[in-house]
Amino acid sequence: MNNLTLSNKSWKAQSITDKLTDIALEQNKMLAANKGYVISPQKIIRCSRVSDLEIRLLQELMSLMGGINYAFPGHKRLAYKLRKKSTTSIKKALTALRDKGFIEWQIGGGDLGTNHYRVKNLFYNPYLIMSEATDYCVEIILEKYRGVIQYEELYGAIMDFMEPRKDIIDTEADIYGLYIKHLFDFPEDRDCPNLYITYCDRLSDHIESRTGIPIDILWDSHFIEIFKSRLNQMNIEEDKAFDTFFSEATLIRTQVIEEKFGYPLFDEIPLTYKMEEQTDLLGYQNTQIFIDAEYHVNELGNRVTNDQKCFARGKYITSKIFELIEKHSL
């Protein structure tokens, strides 16, 4: 049995992880100038609004850092490693990675007078956060509407939302971009559930408008449950979990997010009934809504302050009124 036959037999028997590890580390079976490997999370590889070249360049920088957490390659070396004849595209991609919060550098800080590159805290990178939020939202929608909504329609609607026409990007119509910008301005909102609740509401509305299929998912309940489970993983006592969720800082950020990205105002809703019918609708149900809201707040007990109860009451009333309007308009 020759070397090729033995190699093919061994290759077929291995898992893909073992195969790639062997390719990265094995130095005796083939010539090897590009040794080793770099861990590249799927979050980065699949991140929206980051170009293929930017992703490859980020991977190259990380591979050059090793255990020292910085790299100092010149533009020409980076261009060669990525098989680019010119450094122009490399310089543009480096600037894009910096502007998108992936890397930072010190000019001339390298050991050879080149730039000194470091990877920023990716846990708070707005591009990764919103890309992952979108994919998470899509998985939940697919789980509930598998067989109801066509993959092509769903993915087409999502791509139209995440990657709109160039004339829409960075405008008020670019909802996805507005969330990214918001996280650059307020990185602490990564840990506020309402950021994801309002975003998934907006994304669901867009999918509905594109596919004609109503997306009936209570994102409020969904993300609150996720948040509670994370509190449990952090070993926060149950009696303190509610206080953590409705802390003063969280309430402030929640109000800011809802004012910016929350449910649309009444005058933005396409009403299909006359004004007097709207008044009758709200007037007829008004008393019961407030009674239910008070009951809802009282269930919270003494775990919350009066301000927190006021916030919870207002959110409950608002959601019920919109449910009535939506039901009546249909």
Image: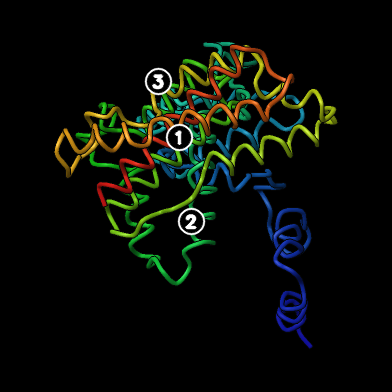
Identify the element where label 2 is drawn.
helix
- Residue annotated with mark 3: 259
- Residue annotated with mark 1: 288
Judge whether 286 appears above or below 114 on screen.
below
Residue farthest to the left, as pictured: 274
Q: Amino acid at mark 1?
A: Gln
For label 3, count other residues whose C-alpha is less than 10 Å away and answer few (under 14), some (14-19) or many (20+): few
Q: State the separation of the CA atoms marked 3 and 1.
A: 26 Å
Front residue of 48/316: it is: 316
Q: Is residue 243 left or right of residue 252?
A: right
Which marked residue is nearer to the observer: mark 1 or mark 2?
1
How many marks the image carries: the answer is: 3
- Residue annotated with mark 2: 141
Judge whether 203 appears above or below 195 on screen.
below
Which one is earlier in the sequence, the residue at label 1 or at label 2?
A: 2
Q: Is residue 130 left or right of residue 9?
A: left
For label 1, count other residues whose C-alpha is less than 10 Å away and answer few (under 14), some (14-19) or many (20+): few
Front residue of 108/124: it is: 124
For label 2, count other residues whose C-alpha is less than 10 Å away and answer few (under 14), some (14-19) or many (20+): some
Q: Amino acid at mark 2?
A: Ile
